[in-house]
Amino acid sequence: MTNNTTPSIPFRRFWFTLLFQTALILAVPAQAIYTHITGKIIILQTAPLEPYNLLRGYSQTMRYDISSQEQLRGLPGWNNLPKQQSDDNTVMFIKPGTHFYVILAEPISLRLPGLPQPWEPISLSLKRPTNLNNNQVVLRGIAQRGLIEYGLENYTMPEAERNQINDDLRAARLANPEQTQQIPPIVMEVKVDAWGNAVPISLWVQTGEANQQNIRQYRL
């Protein structure tokens, strides 16, 4: 009687699939760690938060000025991106699923009072630019229907810190009743690596009365 110890094909497939899935799971935090270590710090301007639904739950969703395709239409490189007509045929959007790059430039005035100054989008490219100036970074995005996602939209925040931000924003609205429809400015500090991948680092929030504003930083 022969004892065949060679693993069966289904058994080998099981281990291959398991190792492949494990590698995929580990790849995400590994890339985030790489970006944390090698990335360059930039500031992004957030889009307004809904006044009565600020930061809710353990997972928050944030949008940015550059999340809107409308903000990118006039930039060099826009015409080179594949387009798809909107449902009402009145405007062209970047074709959903298109990966491309937004080139951002450091603001000229860095020492203005108030929040850190957001970096400005200056051009778009289908291919990753490799000849950037020292005051520029490239951010990789993917087009959705009318929006752009950069991997910076969803993040978690400790409950105590989230509640503190919400309290600060509500207090700012009460202190400035003439601006009840406006949310105090919020910017996101992120790190971007050479490949255009980004991770959120902290939120900067402006609170207080108009004549006595406070700037607070909240680590993520």
Image: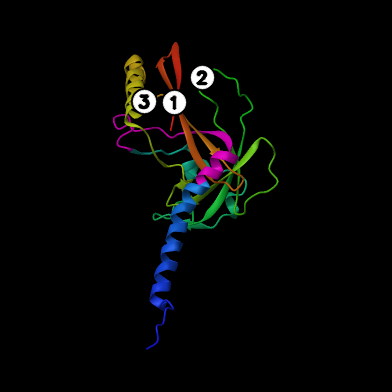
Type of the residue with mark 2: Gly
Answer with left or right where residue 161 lies relative to residue 136.
Answer: left
Q: CA distance from mark 1 to mark 3?
A: 12 Å
Query: N-terminal of the two: label 1 or label 2?
Result: 2
Q: Is residue 113 above or below residue 47?
A: above
Give percent across and percent down for residue 86: 43, 54
Q: Is residue 113 above or below residue 49?
A: above
- Disc 2: CA contacts within 10 A as few (<14), some (14-19) or many (>=20): few
Q: Residue at x 41, y 63 (%)?
A: 18
- Disc 1: CA contacts within 10 A as few (<14), some (14-19) or many (>=20): some
Query: N-terminal of the two: label 1 or label 3?
Result: 3
Q: Which mark is residue 165?
A: 3
Residue pushed farthest top? 211
Q: CA distance from mark 1 to mark 2?
A: 10 Å
Residue pushed farthest bottom? 1
Answer with left or right where residue 102 lies relative to residue 168.
Answer: right
Type of the residue with mark 3: Ile
Type of the residue with mark 1: Pro
Image quadrant in which the C terminus is located: top left
Q: Nearer the viewer, mark 1 or mark 3?
A: 3
Q: CA distance from mark 3 to mark 2?
A: 17 Å
Residue 211 highlighted magenta (yes or no): no
Residue pushed farthest front? 1
- Magenta region: 32-58
Give percent across and percent down for residue 162: 34, 29
Give percent across and percent down for residue 174: 31, 17
Image quadrant in which the N terminus is located: bottom left
Instruction: Identify the residue under disc 2.
Output: 114
Instruction: Identify the residue under disc 1.
Output: 185
Answer with left or right where residue 165 lies relative to residue 127.
Answer: left
Q: Nearer the viewer, residue 143 or 39?
A: 39
